[in-house]
Image: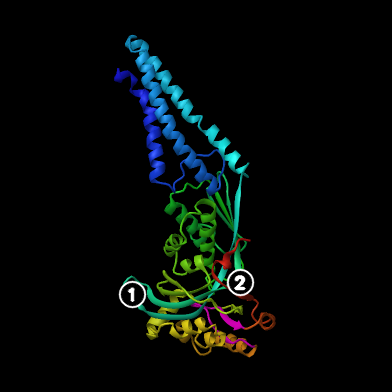
């Protein structure tokens, strides 16, 4: 009889395998919703489906046994169409499970919009301290840095919808919107890492931060995409795991996921929180000249201008909440390899003359930042500098993930 009735147990077996897969891979979407779901709704639907798969699989198997026993005395030729009819009934019943699950979703959450949208700020970073050591065997340089988030930002709007794949648009036509864009690669990396299927995501980037400035614009955009996708698809994903994922995209991306005041070591992947920078204001000045990060590292290697010092003075100043001491402890290895006639030093001198407590190159440049004790003096300095350097911005310091609060 099993030669005839094996097909009756095929559907229950497949249902049990799907349920087991759902338990073993909890981050992978199990319920194929006919409409986009938020992460919370998807988790609820997956749980409902897992329970129904177990229950219906056992019920279908019992039904098969019952029918098989009832018709066992019939000729084989008569049993075969009955077995196929039972299998068809089981398949229809399995497909119909979507109806009670959709009803349960509506009863618990109400009707969901067809499109889910998250808007994230991609805030700039500055390096209060940046010490570059010798090149490591893996090709990276050993770094010690203290990074700080500043309230000058790009804005990214991420929409989850049905169909269309992954699409990135940008307000700056000079910025590529394909795989060469770090924000685009961040979305690809997120879906690859989590195993979540991308049914359709649109990313709209409103670009304000200048490129090749040492302000972490590209890294901040990538981090904002990761945070938005986490909120939409995997809010249970630990932040530490998201930072680890971000490290594969670039040295500054893990910090840009976290934000605030952070001590960075290694190539940027080892993060340690510090006492937040005392409330203050920043003026960021980007001259027309741009510096290639690779070229700047080559200059350090050529001059062997390595800095292996730690960040003890900076950490002590931050712990004491002493803003002037923080400014006194600022240092940047990249600034040391610039030619004496570099425009960077003219900008730095101008910032100090306008009341900055400290001023320095950010990252590998070419932006220069100045720290001001109050908003009024910072905005006056910003207005005075903008006439000479149009890409001048003013923003306050931001602590922790407050830097990325949703718009």
User: Which quarter shows the N terminus?
Assistant: top left
Mark toward the start of the polypeptide (2 vs 1): 1
Does the rendering let one see residue 181? Answer: no
Decide: few, some or many residues near mark 2? Use Cα within 10 Å; few <14, some 14-19, many ≥20: many
Q: Is residue 363 magenta?
A: yes
Q: Check residue 204 in the rendering and tell me which mark sits there, or answer none.
A: none
Q: Position of residue 399 (x, y in %)?
A: 56, 72
Residue span colored magenta: 355-372
Residue positioned 39% across, 41% down in the render? 21
**Position above or below: 312 against 12:** below
Among the 4 quarters of the image, the one containing residue 321: bottom right
**Local secondary structure at mark 2:** strand
Q: Which is more toward the observer, 223 or 90? A: 90
On the picture, is 172 further left or further right than 7? Answer: right
Q: Position of residue 10 (x, y in %)?
A: 36, 27
List the residue tagged with mark 1: 136
List the residue tagged with mark 2: 151
Q: Position of residue 383 (x, y in %)?
A: 69, 80
Viewer-nearest of labels 2 and 1? 2
Residue positioned 35% across, 72% down in the render? 139
Q: Position of residue 299 (x, y in %)?
A: 42, 82
**Position above or below: 324 against 221:** below
Distance Cα–Cα, label 2 vs label 1: 33 Å
Q: Which is more toward the observer, 397 or 177? A: 397
Does the rendering let one see residue 77? Answer: yes
Among the 4 quarters of the image, the one containing residue 141: bottom left
Q: Is residue 142 magenta?
A: no
């Amino acid at each position: 009889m099993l030669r005839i009735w094996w097909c009756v147990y095929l559907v229950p077996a497949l249902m049990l395998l799907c349920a087991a897969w759902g338990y073993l891979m909890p981050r992978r979407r199990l319920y194929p919703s006919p409409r986009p779901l938020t992460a919370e709704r998807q988790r609820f639907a997956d749980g409902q489906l897992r329970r129904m798969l177990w229950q219906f699989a056992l019920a279908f198997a019992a039904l098969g046994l019952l029918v098989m026993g009832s018709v066992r005395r019939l000729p084989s030729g008569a049993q075969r169409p009955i077995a196929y009819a039972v299998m068809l009934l089981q398949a229809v019943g399995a497909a119909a499970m979507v109806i009670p699950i959709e009803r349960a979703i509506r009863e618990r959450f109400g009707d969901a919009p067809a499109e889910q949208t998250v808007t994230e700020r991609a805030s700039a970073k500055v390096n209060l301290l940046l010490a570059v050591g010798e090149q490591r065997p893996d090709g990276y340089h050993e770094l010690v840095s203290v990074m700080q988030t500043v309230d000058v930002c790009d804005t990214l709007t991420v929409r989850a919808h049905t169909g269309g794949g992954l699409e990135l648009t940008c307000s700056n036509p000079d910025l590529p919107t394909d795989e060469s864009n770090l924000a685009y690669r961040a979305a690809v990396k997120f879906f690859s890492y989590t195993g979540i299927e991308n049914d359709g995501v649109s990313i709209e980037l409103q670009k304000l931060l200048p490129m090749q400035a040492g302000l972490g614009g590209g890294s901040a955009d990538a981090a904002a995409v990761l945070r938005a996708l986490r909120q939409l698809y995997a809010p249970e994903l630990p932040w530490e795991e998201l930072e680890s994922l971000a490290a594969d995209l670039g040295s500054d991306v893990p910090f840009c996921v976290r934000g605030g005041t952070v001590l960075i070591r290694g190539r940027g992947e080892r993060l340690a929180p510090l006492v937040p920078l005392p409330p203050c204001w920043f003026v960021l000045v980007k001259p027309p000249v741009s510096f290639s990060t690779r070229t700047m590292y080559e200059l350090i290697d050529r001059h062997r201008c390595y800095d292996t010092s730690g960040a003890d003075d900076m950490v002590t100043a931050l712990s004491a909440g002493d803003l002037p001491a923080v400014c006194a402890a600022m240092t940047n290895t990249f600034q040391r390899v610039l030619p004496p006639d570099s425009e960077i030093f003219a900008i730095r001198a101008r910032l100090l003359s306008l009341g900055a407590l400290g001023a320095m190159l950010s990252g590998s440049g070419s932006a220069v930042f100045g720290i001001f004790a109050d908003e009024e003096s910072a905005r006056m300095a910003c207005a005075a500098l903008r006439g000479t350097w149009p890409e001048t911005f003013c923003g306050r310091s931001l602590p922790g993930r407050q830097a990325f609060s949703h718009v």
